[in-house]
Image: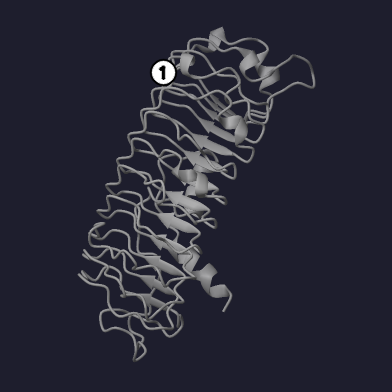
Amino acid sequence: MKPLPLLLLTALLSGASGQYTYGYFNWLARVLAYSRLRWQPYVEREESAPSSADCPAECTCPPSLPTAMYCDTRRLRHVPRVPARMKYVYLQDNLIQAVPDGVFDNATGLLWLVLHRNNISSHGLGKRVFSKLDNLQRLYLDHNKLTSIPHPLPRSLQELRVAGNRISKVQPNSLQGLRNLTTLLLNDNRLEDVGGSLKALKSLSFLDLSNNHLKKVPKVIPDTTEQLYLDYNHISAIPSEYFRKLLRLQYARISNNQLTDQGIPTGAFNVSSLIELDLSHNKLHNIPPVNENLEHLYLHANRIKEINVESFCAGSGPLTFSKIRVLRLDGNGLRHGGLPEELDRCLRQARMINI
């Protein structure tokens, strides 16, 4: 049965294009079925094949996938009875408003529970509805009408998606006990601050807080974080040493904010682990110094008027050069004729530079 999770993960991947068409972000977005992408029908179900006797009439339970139940896109207003053998339940794109306590008690072996794009409110979500799902790994509640993160959640949870809801605050205890959580999508909500709520996430690697109302970066980011999305907020400053504490951080997107030169301390982005950094659509007049290991840098649509080689290469010489492969500076008013002569030597590995 080992191939089943891989097959189902492959089925979840969306073929839609992301916002960006370059760099690692787009590729990773597809691999992770990034929540901003519109969900598409993602599996070829055996609609004509007979379902087992214990399968609800509203759903399809293909014999070839004996632990999967497909109830998506059926205009359902309630959660049907889930047979005990089920591990993967798909209820997305329905009209479900409430998920009461006890509705999943017959299927305590659930691994994936997909409930996105319904009308579920926090009031309609039972307080103990997930309490017996001790093996649950993925919970998708994005694009509903939640005003808070459900609590308590199974400690086994590895991926939580609550994007596209109406969440304005993360309660201090909302994420307590989720030591196995690696992926948290809270984008497209109404968050103004997350306080220290993320501190409890000891295994987090992927965090999306984009398209909220944040005026400052989160107070605490787990040091296990590898991918961080803070774009489309109102952030104007980065605290000193903020990113230097994130020794595993590889991808950071802080585009479409209010960042200024004064709000970025010296060396804020001089982090050796960073591979890709997006600071586009801000209010920068200068290029902040970055580490020579950085490969993709996006600074388009700022107010930059000149390029300092020192922003990319700390020194000069035949062995001193940047690993940047893609650099975007278009939309700043720069001119090719005003580029420093040393820039070619410093950016010798670049394959694309847009001025």
Q: Nearer the viewer, residue 58 or 13?
A: 58
Quadrant that contains the N terminus: bottom right
Residue type at numbered disc 1: Lys
Q: Nearer the viewer, residue 355 or 255?
A: 255
**Residue 302 x %, y %:** 43, 19
* Residue at 48% from the left image edge and 61% from the top image edge: 157
Q: Is residue 272 visible?
A: yes
**Residue 182 x %, y %:** 53, 53
Q: With respect to residue 158, does 280 lie above or below?
A: above
Q: Nearer the viewer, residue 108 or 111?
A: 108
* Residue at 57% from the left image edge and 31% from the top image edge: 243
**Residue 296 x %, y %:** 57, 32
* Residue at 52% from the left image edge and 35% from the top image edge: 252
Tell me: 214 left or right of 322: left
**Residue 59 x %, y %:** 30, 79
Q: Nearer the viewer, residue 289 or 264?
A: 264
- Number of marks present in the image shown: 1
Which residue is most to the top?
338
Q: With respect to residue 310, does 94 lie above or below?
A: below
Tell me: 2 left or right of 77: right
Q: Label 1 belongs to which residue?
A: 283
Q: Is residue 295 visible?
A: no
The residue tagged with tag 1: helix, strand or loop?
Answer: loop
Q: With respect to residue 116, does 194 lie above or below?
A: above
Q: With respect to residue 326, does 305 lie above or below?
A: above
